[in-house]
Amino acid sequence: MKNTTLLCIALCFACTFSKAQSNRINISGSLIDSSSNVLSFASVLLLMPEDSALVTYTLSDDDGAFSFKNLPSRDYLVKATYISYLPHQMLVQPGESKDINLGQIILKPISKELYEVVVKTARAPISIKGDTIEYDASKFKVPPGSSVEDLLRKLPGMEVDQDGNLRAQGESVQKVTVDGKRFFGGDTKMATKNLQADVIKKVQVFDDKSEASKLTGIDDGNTEKTVNLELKEEAKKGGFGKVTAGLGTDSRAMVSGNYNKFDSKNQFSILGFGNNVNQSGMSYEDYEEFKGSNSYNWGNSGDFGFTRTTGYSNFFSTSDDSFSIPVGGGNGDGFSKNAAGGINYNYNHKKDEISANYFYNQTSQTLDAFQNRQNFITNSLSNETTDQSNQNNFNGTHRVSLRAQKELDTLNTITFIGNGRVGNREVNYQSLQEIFKSDGFKANKSDIKNSSERFSYALSSTLLFRHKFKKKGRNFSWSGGYDLSNNDSEDLQKSINEFYSATDANDVIKSINQLNATQNKTDQLKSSVLWIEPFAKKFAWETFYNFSINGSEVDRNVTDKYPDKPDETNLNLTRLYDNEIMYNRVGTSVRYSHKGVNFTTGLARVFYNIDGKLIGPPNIGDGIVDKDYQAWTPYSALTLRLRNNKSFRFNYTMGLNAPSTNDLQPIVDNSNPLYIREGNPDLLPEVTHQVSGSFNMYNPVSFVNLYLHAAYNYNVNQIIYNQNIDPETFITSTKPVNVTGGSSTNSYMYLGFPLKKTKITMGINANVRFSKYLANINDVLNETKSDNYGIGTNLNLTPVDWFTFYGYANWSLGNTSYSINSQQDLKIINNSYNGEMNIKLPKDFFWNSNLNYRIYTNERLGFDQKVPILNMSFYKLLGEKKKAEIRLSAYDIFKKNLGISQYASQNFISTREVQTLSRYFMLSFTYNMRGVSDKITRR
């Protein structure tokens, strides 16, 4: 009887399922115009007849064909739209056949008088205009108060990862503009996280030409994946922004706000925040986004020619950090109090562009960390270092920027860029470091108490002039720049160092109590010229010259402090450096550009002169470095823009990097008794050969996108640091040397596709990296090989307006092997899972939850950490216009948050754990300002 009942249920289910499938239909057709021309990439909408509600949509393919598959059997409206054509609409009623072919649908050209009216009444969710894909924001519903990031997640072909990074059509988005103006810089996060979705009318995605191409009129093969946000008209008539304030348990609090005012000429923004919930808000990169038009486009640095950064003296890399006390650092870990505020103004009208801003941010941070590091010396000798530290930091920085561009006439343009920064930093650092031999015997112990105060400022200025000749493509450019940087610091270093294996009684305990006062001044004068000459219609010849003089002076005074006698200058550690680097580069290249093919090949000659002086104590003497380097640096690049939204890129570059003056100085630095450093005046420049290629494909009909990338690097005369480690005391002495043979190979793949158009999309990514690093450990060459494999996936569910789910998973495996100690080979596993769910409840209530589950595993070290972080919030929209929101949030409900990292390289393995802000609850209130009038009522 039981089996009979089950059989009946199964038969009923099968019949129901069969009937459901038999009640499905397919609709297809093709689009042409009245001249029988195929209409590719036209928008085709499927609507409900009773209220014209959108069911789904698609685009016609290259042949003008379209189809809707597996639809419920019922009446539909099919509407076809195409730019400059009248929309066509027809009623489709199911018949006996489940396959309904509408045949050829003819669209008629539209008159100019009716164009605007038709566009407003027949707007499609997605349309293609040339190389631009345009989304109608009103067709993709998000809850009130949502950010642009929430809107972009719903757009087919767009991907937003858990860190807020954007991908469009398989490629990373490099630029976001607002009404065509590059306002928020290149990283995009500032725009997508702070602008509100309800002020956006359209989202446009396209490949923007490089600044060089725009100015010269010659396609250089370089493009930037760009997203343009077109504002609604009402957003331009008044200001918009929002203010949020919250109070939580454990004395947690936060406040933030921003206000924006845009029109056709002006863009104005002001923002600020303060909190003690570890939201530092803006890093230096975030600031670059905030600066808007001060973005670092081509030519803004004034360094012309191919691979402009390769081999060029980098002004901001010349500060000598080697003399600073090792105080560590943090990246969102620990406990921090943060505050920041800034104002930004852009003016863009006809021939004039001006952008100016000011920004200040400060952070107070406390870090309690434990670090374990294993060092491998030989196949039978190793040691283990433990470090229990406490650190209190304060950073405060003022920044100001100005960029002005004037088009003197149709042929001449002048641009000025100026940046300034003033900052101060205070650090108090305590650490107990212990070194153990492989048998567990304690070799060393250091009790460190360091403090540091620093004041710094920097100025940077660049002037550029560009002239276009009447002959199309002929261009001349000149740039000149001056940079200045100053860093004054006072570092108090106190430590007691015990060496349990020392054979001399005087070496058992070494105490340090020193004041290190250092002044570091750097300036740079540079200039570049560029000439572009077109010939034979499809070719252009480019010739460039780069010049710079980089001077730096480091005045270091070290004082030994004693409790029972006057302080004394430490002549062994007091130094005065005076260094100058002269850089010259002259080069030329030939470019071919025609019908999507862009090929460039060129050659440059690089000249370096490094002139360094060291004034030391009488017992050591002065040091002099006078080095000249010359090298040829070739370059080749190929870009193919293929049909059907496919592209291929190939690059070969050779980079030349001169040794730093710090590495070249022939002196011994023993300020840290456990780590002694010596320079090497015989160093040669590093040479890096890089070959890379990529392929991208995007199908705007199926929304399938594929991106492939691979690169290989090989190093000649790579600068590495030899280590000589005393097997008894484990005191390490290092010296830079040249070695050839280091290399790396990496590859990346991303595939995105819809499982159900507009409802379910999925992405799969994979990466593989092989690297080889060489270093001499006690005169034995160690070859460290690292093989890293990663795979990830993301799933976006947006089936209905009231529910969304975004899921991410990433798995990574790293295999590291050491030739000097194969017994220490290891596997490092880092896995992460993230899911975000949003539910709209009745009466304008909303539920949001986010689970981030991270797993860190290292079996050989017995390291196994699982960190589940669950955040939830419940909020209600208030008011008739839903401008206000009250929210109750819970952070880290399981109370498991812990800053964890593990890393393997060279001849060591390191794991680190940092105590970090954990569970708390917060009640917050947000008010969204939309359409705020900027007029004052007269009485």
Image (cartoon, rainbow, N blue to C red):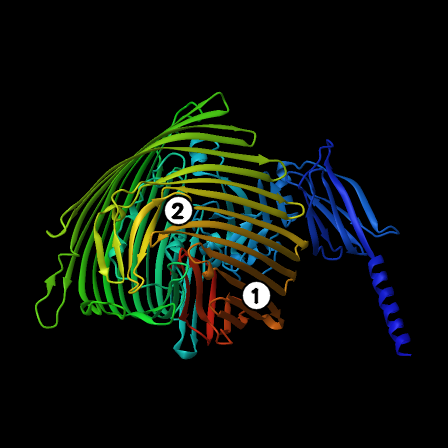
Q: Which of these two is toward me, 319 or 634?
A: 634
Q: Against 594, is 558 above or below?
A: below
Pick whichever, 498 or 583, lies toward us. Answer: 498
Residue 678 higher or lower than 384, as above or below? above
- The reply to whether residue 272 is in sight is yes
Q: Is residue 431 left or right of residue 590?
A: left
Dot 1 amino acid type: Glu
Label disc, if present, on residue 836 of the rendered structure: 1
297 displayed left or right of 483 = right
Using residue 462 as the reference point, say whether residue 139 is left or right of it: right
Q: Kindly identify the amino acid type of the residue bearing the numbered disc 2.
A: Ser
Rounded to the nearest whole Å, what is the CA distance between mark 2 and mark 1? Answer: 32 Å
Relative side of 526 to 852, left or right? left
Point out residue 518 in the picture as x, y percentages from the top left corner. 19, 56
Residue 409 appears in the rendering: no
Give the residue at mark 2: 295
Q: Which mark is residue 496?
A: none
